Image (tube, rainbow, N blue to C red):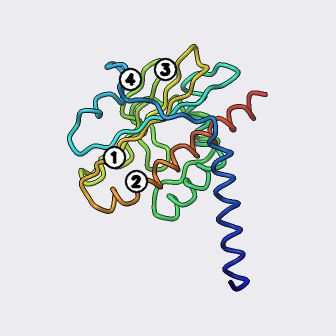
Amino acid sequence: MNGLAKVSLVAAAVTAAVVSFATRKVASTPLSSLHSSNLIARFVSTPDQHVDVYQVTLSKPTSVEHFAKAFFQSPVFQVERGLLSLAGAAKTTDAEIDAMTFASGDHVATFRVIESKQDEILFCWDDTEAWNGHSWVAVKDNGHTLLFGSTLRNRRAFIRRVMPLHLMYAQIVLASAKFQLERTTS
């Protein structure tokens, strides 16, 4: 094994360890546990629509608005915002996110608020029928549990192939949002 192969192997092992450590408290939420009134629940029975929901617990309660701000300002999502900006999405600053109320029509990069309730916000991240993607943030248990869900039209083989990466990323970005919340409320 040459030097580059060894470095690559070590980098892969370190990355796997970091991801495993960061997401150790993130749990998959059974879709059957969603209440029919949850904004994301409408997609569970939609044909060819993938739905995933993850949750993590906080020691201090928060509101869905603070969760959404922490989500979009988290270290992991800051990288995504930069990549989306390079790809042509509208640039959104932390100051703009701080000023947001997450009302219908508000935008963060490619994410547009399509509906919100007291404890949940539903975003559409592409208006085209090909992707039909949504992100959902919610709080429950008096603000002690954060929920993050995604929906994605999975008709295309490409989407089905990258789904394991999406599922891993969903857990990582939720863990990053929790980190951001705990860092800013301490």
Secondary element type, mark 3: loop
In this rendering, is residue 20 above or below 53?
Answer: below
* Contact? badges 4 and 2 (CB < 8 Å): no
Disc 2 to disc 3, C-alpha distance: 27 Å
Q: Residue at 40% of width from left, 33% of height from top? A: 122
Q: Nearer the viewer, residue 50 or 180?
A: 50
Mark 3 or 1: in front is 1
The numbered mark, 3 or 4, whose residue comes first in the sequence reads: 4
Q: Nearer the viewer, mark 3 or mark 4?
A: 4
Judged from this view, the residue extending furthest toward the left is 47
Q: For marks 1 and 4, give the CA distance.
A: 17 Å
Find residue 169 and report its horizontal and vertical position in percent: 52, 50
In the displayed orientation, state which residue is furthest to the right: 186
**Residue 58 on image: x %, y %:** 66, 25
Relative to 57, is 125 on the left or the right? left
Mark 3 residue type? Asp
Q: CA distance from mark 3 to mark 4?
A: 13 Å
Q: Which mark is residue 163?
A: 2
Identify the mark at residue 119; answer none if there is no mark: 3
Residue type at tag 4: Leu
Q: Which residue is mark 4?
A: 34
> x%, y% of residue 77?
58, 49
Image quarter of the C terminus = top right
Q: Secondary structure at mark 4?
A: loop
| Image: 169 above or below 9 | above
Q: Are marks 2 and 1 in contact (CB under 8 Å)?
A: yes
Q: Residue most toward the front?
A: 1
Identify the amino acid type marked 2: Met
Which badge, 2 or 1, comes first in the chain's sequence? 1
